Image (tube, rainbow, N blue to C red):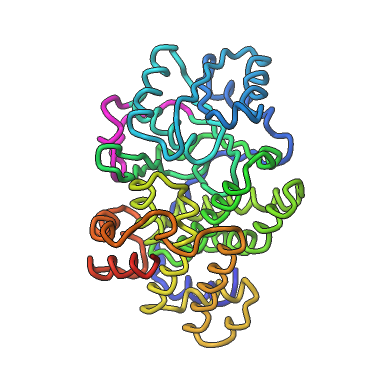
Amino acid sequence: MHDLDAQRSAAETPRVLKFHAPEIVFGPDSLGEVAHATRRLGGVRPMLVTDSGLIESGWAGQLVDLLTAQGLAPQVWSALTPNPKDVEIEAGHGYYADFGCDVLVAIGGGSVMDAAKGIAILAGNGGRILDYEGVDQATRPIPPLVMVPTTSGTGADVSQFCIVTDTARSTKITILGRALVPDITVIDPMLLTTMPEWLNAATGLDALTHGIEAFVSLGHNQLTDHHALRAITMVMSQLARTIDEPTDMAARGSMAQASLEAGLAFTNAILGATHAMSHQVGGLLDLPHGVINGVLLPHVIRFNAAEDPLPYVAIATSLGLDEGRAGPEEAAMAVADRVDRLARQVGVPAGLAEIGVSESDLDVLATNALRDACMSTNPRSATHREMVDLFRSAL
C-alpha cells in the first residue's frame, strides 16, 4: 500500500470490515475447471448462459463438451442482448424452470453474467426481476453460480451487483446483495483473445473506472484500496498493448488480473457518480457501458476533486505522474487528463453528444442518476442542478 494511502486509512475511524469474494480459479487453460466446479456445487443439469458471439467464437461449444465429458447435461440458453433486458431475464428463468436446471454457468461478458444472476434471483425468489431493485431485496437462497468471464473489465464474476435494463422506463436498475457474489469464478486469459477491439477497450475502461471509483468511494477501506490501486496501474500500463498486440498473453493476463482486482475492490467499496450516470445513459441508448464510463470518468474526477482532491494523489503517484509530487489539485487534474488520454487512445468518443445524448435528455438523466445506488458512496454529493451541469460538461 502506498504511504499516502496508508495514512488515509489510518486517519479514519477503525471499524469491522467484511470482504466478499468468490472462490477464484485463475490462469491459462483453466476452462476445464468449470466442469469440476459445477459438479462440486451439486450440478447435474447446469444451465449454460451465453450469447451468440461466444457461440460463434467456439468457447461456448468447448465448454459444453467439457461439461458433457464430466457426465453433466448442460442446457444452453443464449437469447439475450447486450445490456440484458428485464423481459430477457424472465424468459431465461422460464427456460431454467422448463428444463429442470440446477447450477447456473455463465460464459461471457458482463451482460451474460448479469443475466445469469437475474435468472438465479427469479429461480430462488419468483416474481419479476424489477421487484428486486435496491439492496438485499432477494431474501431467499438462489442456485449456485459459476462465472467464466470472456472480457477484461466488468467484474461481474466477483461482484454483488446485477444490472438490468428496465425496458418500460429505458433506464437501468441496480440489484445489490451479498447473495449475488458468485460461488466460483474461473478466469482463463485465453478467452480474452477473441474479444473485438471495441469491446476490449470498453471493458478495460470499465475496470479502470471500477478501480478509481472504489479507491475514492466513501465505502473504501484498507482491504479494498490495494486491489483498486493495482487495477488502476495495470489497466493504464496494459490496455493499449492488448489492442496493439491482441495475442500478447502477458498483457492479457495482466488485464484479466486487473479486471479481477477492480471487481474485488468495487464489490466491497461500491462505486460512485460515474456509474450512477453511466447506468442512465446506457439504459436510454442501449450503448456499451464501458464506453460511456470512458467518456464520463474524467469529468467525474474533476467534479469530485473540486471538493476533495487528496485521494487522487495516491493514484497519481501510483501512475508515476510528476504531478503526484505537486499539490492535491494538480495531482487530481493530472489523473483526469491521463484517463482522458487513454480513452482517446483506445477509440472512445470525446463526448456524450457523439453517442446520441442531447441537451433535452439531461434533466431525466440527472434525476435518475441521483436515485442510483452508486451515488450513495460517491465522495461528493450533488444537487439536481449540479448533476445536470456535470452531464452537460460531458456532452
Residue 185, placed above or below residue 361: above
Give the residue at x 59% y 85%.
Answer: 325
Q: How far across and how far down the image is residue 65, in percent?
A: 67, 18
Give the residue at x 72% y 48%.
Answer: 246
Based on the picture, tell me whether residue 284 belongs to the magenta stretch. Answer: no
Based on the picture, tell me whether residue 142 belongs to the magenta stretch. Answer: yes
Residue in the foreground of this view, choosing between 358 and 153: 358
Residue in the foreground of this view, choosing between 44 and 316: 316
Can you tell which quarter of the image residue 307 is in? bottom left
Quadrant, the N terminus:
bottom right
Residue 338, placed above or below residue 58: below
Q: How far across and how far down the image is residue 323, in percent?
A: 58, 83
Magenta residue span: 125-144
Give the residue at x 61% y 54%.
Answer: 258
Quadrant, the C terminus:
bottom left
Q: How far across and how far down the image is residue 194, in percent?
A: 67, 39
